[in-house]
Image: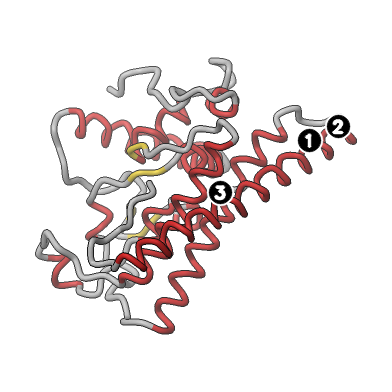
Amino acid sequence: MTSPPDPALTEAEQAAFLQSIARVRSAAGRALRAAQAHAMQGAAAHGTDTNAAAQAAVDFIAQLHQGLDTVAEQARATGPQPACQAGCAHCCHLRVEATEPEVLHIAQHLRTLPGADQATTTVRLQQHVAAASAGSTRQPCSFLVHDRCAIYSVRPAACRKAHSLSAAHCAEQSPTIPQNLRLLVDAEALMAGTALAYRDQSLPARAHELNAAVLAALDSTVATPPSALLRWYRGDDGALALRSTPP
């Protein structure tokens, strides 16, 4: 997580990259601890949800996502323009990874949807995981609907960072995609520093394949305690392991 994203960086740039990670780690750690403490105080004062701190830790991932969106906006304002646009979904057919708090954040969003939409999404996830288990390496993301992201507002950091300066390269499935190096460096620093801040508090923040991990989070319900949220908050590295085999 702490390796520079591109060997083209000079020695000075690599040092600056690692310093950026350290700054993000420190700032995110303080903010994460404060968010949990505030949630616990509020819960104690009102005699409400005892899982408030765990929920606050998941909600905190939105801070990373906001930071990444800002980095992307700044890159578009000052650097080469990405070729990405609505309906361009080449990268949505590649493997996507997300950390535990991101996966839990997405799963919680999905549970707010109407029952029929939740069921449809679950079937898509099961089909995706089954195809991947059968050896399929390039298939549409379960959340890609009519070439649009169905979870755009809560999409993971990897998707927010992803971009291309050439739609042609993407369409041709080129092994090398031209990208804005400044955007990549700044985004990687935010992502690595935030993951380390979670780990510093014994909260797992590892990369998981998105579809399988979300399916596992949805599979962990109140009927099978403890929930994925509580298992994760207790430091369980297996909180997002699938409990059943997709059909």
- Quadrant of the rendered image containing residue 13: bottom left
What is the number of the mark on residue 40?
1
Circle on res. 89: none
Residue shown at the point (76%, 40%) measured from the top left: 37
Q: What colour scheme governs how the chains and residues are painted in the rendered image of this protein?
A: secondary structure
Q: Earlier in the sequence, mark 1 or mark 3?
A: 1
* Image spot of residue 80 (x, y percent): 31, 82
Where is mark 3, residue-wise?
A: 61
In the rendered structure, which amino acid carries the disc numbered 1? Met
Identify the residue at the far right of this view.
Answer: 45
The C terminus, quarter of image: top left
Q: State the residue position of label 2.
A: 44
In contact (CB < 8 Å): disc 1 and disc 2: yes
- Identify which residue is drawn at 57% across, 16% down: 225
The single residue placed furthest to the top in the displayed view is: 224
Tell me the CA gap for discs 2 and 3: 23 Å
Q: Amino acid at mark 3?
A: Ile
Which residue is at the front of the view, 65 or 24? Answer: 24
